[in-house]
Amino acid sequence: MDGPSHYDRESWKIHTVDPFPYFPPEVRDPLLAKMLRKVEPRAGKIDHDVDGRLIGNWFQQGTNAYAGTNPGKYWDGHLAIVPETLDPTQWRFSIGNFAGEARQFAIKGNGPDPRNISADTGLVKYELTSFEYYALSDPSRRGLGGRGGIRAGDDVVSRNLDQVLGVALVQMTGARTLRCEVFPGKTAAEVTGFAASAKTYER
């Protein structure tokens, strides 16, 4: 299995096109005014893979790629290291199984930049934190929904919270292969190398 065949379950997820340029202005402009994402493409982006670089989507070897081995939990073997959807200046580490749960994290210090990580880089540690959204015009308005939260059309910023929730250890082993292990509840100082639960990912 290689490349596009990883997405046989939902083949449209190889690439999506921003629909906004195809609307007439009288429809497009009111819709864009309500959007939280302010950067192009305004509808977002799902295809971040770059051969030989850490950035993008990954699938644990032996888990049937996007489709997974269990249709009710197909995401269990998924991994993505990608820009934040609403605030692409920030990185997200999203994994289908972090101590038994699918989780999405910020990266403490927002680096090293996954666009620059290759097989030549060697071992990289990422400390994982939670994050929150707030309105740039009024930082007291936080969160995507509910009273006092972010509203349609706001300029949205994301910030990392302080508490380290775990560590991800990653090492590119080829242009389309990656070794990764997560250590829930650990800090970078407590992780020196891969242990028994390290997994190989591919794309």
Image: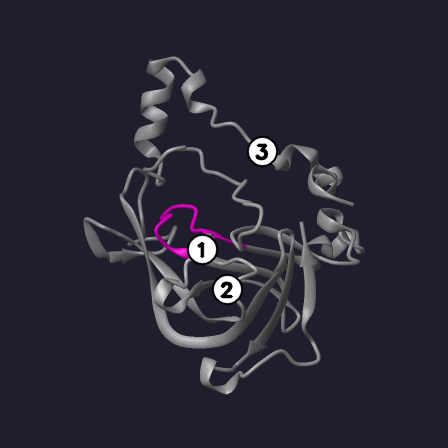
Q: CA distance from mark 2 to mark 1?
A: 8 Å
Magenta stretch holds residue 65: no
Residue 133 placement: quadrant: bottom left
Helix or strand or loop: what does disc 2 sit on?
Answer: loop
Q: Which residue is mark 3?
A: 15
Q: Nearer the viewer, residue 199 or 132?
A: 199
Q: Amino acid at mark 1?
A: Asn
Helix or strand or loop: what does disc 1 sit on?
Answer: helix
Q: Which residues are magenta?
A: 81-91
- Pinpoint residue 78: horizontal percent, then vertical percent: 65, 56
What secondary structure is the magenta-colored segment mainly?
Answer: loop
Q: Report the side of 202 relative to 112 (left or right).
A: right
Q: Which residue is mark 1?
A: 116
- Would you call the spot at circle 1 few (<14 residues within 10 Å), some (14-19), or many (20 or more)? few
Give yes or no for contact between labels 3 and 1 (Cβ–Cβ under 8 Å): no
- Would you call the spot at circle 3 few (<14 residues within 10 Å), some (14-19), or many (20 or more)? few
Q: Amino acid at mark 3?
A: His
For the point 65% across and 32% down, the residue is: 12
- Residue 167 higher or lower than 172, as above or below: below
* Model colouring: one colour
